Every structure is written in structure tokens, then in C-alpha cells.
Amino acid sequence: MPDVLIDAGAPGGFPDVAAYCLRHTIPLMECVSHLREKHSELLAEVAAAVPVLEAVNLSFGNYLQRRLAGLVAAAHHFTLPEVDVLDRHPARKAVRVSATAERLAAAWTDAGGHPEAELGLRRGGPEVSEHSITWTWGTDEALTVHHQVTSLRAVARTALVVAHHLPRRPPGLVTMDDFFHIQQTTHEREVS
């Protein structure tokens, strides 16, 4: 039996993954985009029995990007910005805005930012992905926070760290943001 099951398949395969984790009480790292839309009740059932980490994006840079979007939302400017989120993946990715881009836009609005971000997508270019959020104030000033992943080694490294820590957690659902926050808090206590 594995210590952790990492699911990066299609949403349609999740019922089988959930059944396996429930049957063998195996913690789950769920890396399937748009999963909550189709299987929220089943995800909650698994999380009631074992630790589940929902990881729409495993990269630390994307976590920081969402945190920065919240900081910009908390800062008040004289004028409302135009806000754009760009999602770029290779041509083989489905032609719809990724869950990563949707969550980046939500980080802005959830922190009180308005207006809502306009979502754009581009399919093509190099592996793996890039996401940016740009705030434009009038015609004279703009801020862009851009994040690019050029190798899946970056997310694999994070997945291994999470897989090491996840079995020690109690049952329940945590997000990748929760995990990074817990790691930061734990590190700060150890340093103090």
C-alpha cells in the first residue's frame, strides 16, 4: 500500500480513486483541476476519513502570486484598475481557462479587489505553463506579477514534500495554500 495516493488524472476517474482511498484509508493528494464542480460531495466524504490535500497548482510561485494579488487588493489607489489574468499552457491543454487562472482571479476579488479580473488564455508556447495578473491604472501605470513553470520537476519536488507530510495530518481537506501557510508557521515557530 502506498503512504499517499497522488491523483493527477481526469475528473471522471475520481470516484475510483476515492473508493480506493476510503477502502485502504490512504491519504490523498488531489491534483485534478475543476474537481469540486463534479465531485464535491465525494471529496468531502474522503476528507472525513483521511487527510486530503487539494492542489490545483503545486508551485510555490503560484502561491506567492495569489498572496500578492491579495496584497494589491488591500492597497487603495485613487482610481480603479483594469485587471487581467492571462493563462498560457501548451497547445495540447484544453481550450478553457485553467483552474489556476480562475483561482488567481479569485484571490484578487476574495481579498476585496474590484472590478473582477478579465480572464484570457493562450494555447501554445513552451512547456509547462505561465500565469500573470496585471493591474493597469489609467494609461500611465501598470503592475504585472508573472509566474512561469518551465519544468514539471518544480511541481514534482513540491509533491514529494507534501506526500511526506500528509500522512501525519488528521482527516480533513486542506488546500495547497493551507499547506504552504502551515509550513511557514511551523518554520517560524522552530526559528523562534
Image (cartoon, rainbow, N blue to C red):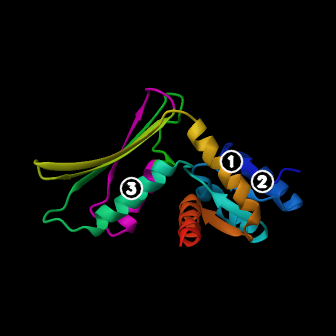
| Amino acid type, residue under disc 2 in the picture | Val
Residue corresponding to mark 2: 4
The label shown at residue 85 is none
| Vertical placement of residue 3 versus 51, above or below | above
Q: Nearer the viewer, mark 1 or mark 3?
A: 1
Residue 85, visible in the rendered structure: no
| Identity of the residue drawn at 73% across and 65% down | 51
Helix, strand or loop at mark 2: loop
Residue corresponding to mark 1: 160
Mark sitting earlier along the chain (3/2): 2
Residue 46 rendering spot, x and y as whole percentages: 75, 64
| Identity of the residue drawn at 54% across and 29% down | 92
Q: Nearer the viewer, residue 85 or 69?
A: 69
Mark sitting earlier along the chain (1/3): 3
| Amino acid type, residue under disc 3 in the picture | Ala
Image quarter for residue 107?
bottom left
Q: Nearer the viewer, residue 44 or 57?
A: 57
The Cα atoms of the two marked residues, 1 and 2, are separated by 10 Å
The Cα atoms of the two marked residues, 1 and 3, are separated by 27 Å
Q: Nearer the viewer, mark 1 or mark 2?
A: 1
Helix, strand or loop at mark 3: helix
Q: Which residues are magenta?
A: 101-127
| Identity of the residue drawn at 58% across and 57% down | 37
| Identity of the residue drawn at 47% across and 55% down | 63
Helix, strand or loop at mark 1: helix
Instruction: Sort mark 1 into few (<14), some (14-19) or many (20+) by Cα contacts within 10 Å.
Output: few
